[in-house]
């Protein structure tokens, strides 16, 4: 019953990335820019910068939106305590509840677009696609809360983290180097943009690694996956790249257990949620599931960025438990801060000024929590981080995961290309 209840709770969880970070707030606040004094513009009063957030704060998907937004908030609370951007401009978040519905999200965007300089967070793949159309029309800028490869070259978006394509490529490489050589590799993915991103990475990696993908199946999220699991079982797959959301991960695992089908599962980041290890499928996950994500393990204080996040968390959200979505939200704010610092140096917090600053920042620094993200002089120059974190499921560990490899890179991951 516990597994079933969790499955219902996660019914509409969305693909979000995990665990990223950049240069800590202390480092960004240490040097006050000596540039021009920014004039007042919509979203900047002369002393206060307003950033928009379009995210689910109610409904089932709020289990993602709330910790993400909390990560945003904690970062900016800590930054404001040090004076704010450039040591003197504090940041305020204007939050609109999307309820994880496109129309509601667009209404929220329209409501606050004239009162913010940029959007700190926009959550949900289809929502980002819809809002991005308006960002382009308004010459505005926003941070997508997912690792879709399609964001990499979008000039109106602020992507962070290792894209799903690279995670898939690194996951396949790791598997082949850890007992998978000569084994039959298959894939199971959602029939949407997220699933397509994972499969794209697998296809590109298979060419580099000279591996044949024996069987690929697609499914609609929330649907009965019996037929798809049956196809993989009949094909006698040794490993399955899984591009899913946590609710579907539970259903897929249940069907695999029912078929006595026990492949090595290589689960892309959003396929896992802490707590799954304590469901009825817990023993199956511990034996057969590998998590392929990116970023430092929660609690590793040897990493400066993690230490800074935990210090801020202790002061501004002491009850917060380990949560990859919180980590991602904190990292998004870290990334936006670097762009705002650049805008402060240029003396321009207008929407056009924020976009211009994103092409002047050069490289977003992630301070040990993950690979740096090259932004270059335009979106076409962007080169995302190529590192991954590999973990096994373990009861009692933060987020139910025991890290087995960090900063894992491969030639297959480095070779992944992104369309402009």
Image (spheres, grey):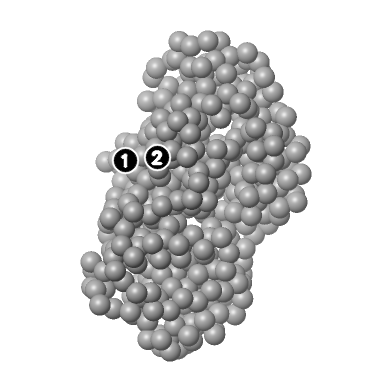
Q: Position of residue 290 (x, y in %)?
A: 35, 67
Above or below, 270 relative to 325: below
Q: Is residue 349 visible?
A: yes
Horizontal and vertical percent position of residue 113? 71, 34
Q: Quick check: 303 left or right of 66?
A: left
| Badge count | 2
Residue 70: name its quadrant.
top right
Residue at x-position 63% and y-position 50%: 129
Taking the image as shown, residue 12 lies to the left or right of residue 206, namely right
Q: Point out residue 183 in the picture as x, y percentages from the top left corner.
A: 28, 78
The spot of residue 130 in percent (x, y) is 67, 49
Residue that mark 2 sits on: 373
Relative horizontal placement of residue 51, taking residue 110 as reference (left or right): left
Task: Please tell me which of labels 1 and 2 falls first in the chain.
Answer: 1
Q: Nearer the viewer, residue 229 or 8?
A: 229
Q: Is residue 14 above or below residue 67?
A: below
Along the line of sight, the residue nearer the viewer: 28 or 311: 28
Residue at left 48%, top 50%?
A: 419
Q: Quadrant of residue 48?
A: top right
Determine whether the residue tagged by mark 1 lies in a helix, strand or loop.
loop
According to the image, label 1 marks what residue?
Answer: 368
């Amino acid at each position: 019953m516990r597994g079933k209840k969790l499955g219902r709770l996660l019914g509409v969880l969305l693909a979000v990335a995990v665990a990223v970070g950049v240069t800590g707030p202390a480092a960004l606040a240490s040097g006050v820019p000596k540039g021009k004094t920014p004039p007042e513009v919509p979203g900047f009063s002369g002393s206060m910068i307003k950033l928009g957030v379009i995210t689910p704060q109610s409904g089932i998907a709020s289990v993602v939106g709330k910790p993400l937004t909390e990560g945003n908030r904690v970062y900016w609370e800590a930054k404001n305590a040090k004076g704010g951007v450039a040591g003197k401009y504090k940041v305020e978040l204007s939050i609109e509840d999307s309820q994880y519905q496109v129309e509601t999200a667009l209404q929220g965007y329209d409501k606050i677009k004239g009162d913010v300089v940029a959007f700190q967070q926009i959550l949900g793949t289809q929502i980002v696609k819809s809002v991005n159309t308006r960002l382009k029309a308004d010459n505005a800028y926003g941070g997508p809360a997912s690792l879709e490869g399609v964001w990499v070259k979008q000039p109106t978006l602020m992507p962070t983290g290792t894209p799903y394509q690279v995670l898939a490529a690194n996951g396949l490489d790791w598997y082949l180097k850890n007992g998978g050589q000569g084994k039959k590799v298959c894939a199971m993915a959602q029939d949407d943009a997220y699933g397509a991103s994972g499969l794209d990475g697998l296809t590109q990696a298979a060419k580099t690694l000279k591996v044949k993908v024996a069987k690929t199946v697609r499914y609609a999220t929330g649907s009965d996956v019996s037929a798809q699991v049956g196809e993989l079982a009949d094909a006698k797959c040794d490993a399955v790249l899984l591009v899913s959301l946590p609710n579907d991960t539970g259903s897929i695992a249940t069907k695999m257990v029912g078929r006595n089908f026990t492949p090595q599962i290589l689960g892309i980041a959003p396929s896992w949620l802490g707590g799954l290890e304590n469901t009825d499928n817990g023993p199956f996950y511990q034996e057969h599931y590998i998590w392929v994500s990116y970023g430092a393990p929660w609690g590793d204080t040897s990493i400066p960025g993690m230490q800074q996040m935990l210090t801020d968390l202790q002061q501004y959200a002491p009850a917060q438990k380990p949560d990859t979505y919180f980590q991602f939200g904190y990292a998004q704010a870290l990334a936006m801060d670097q762009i705002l610092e650049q805008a402060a140096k240029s003396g321009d917090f207008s929407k056009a000024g924020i976009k211009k600053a994103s092409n002047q920042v050069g490289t977003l620094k992630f301070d040990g929590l993950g690979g740096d993200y090259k932004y270059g002089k335009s979106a076409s120059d962007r080169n995302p981080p190529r590192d991954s974190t590999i973990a096994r499921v373990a009861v009692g560990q933060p987020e139910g995961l025991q890290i087995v490899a960090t900063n894992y890179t491969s030639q297959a991951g480095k070779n992944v290309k992104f369309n402009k």
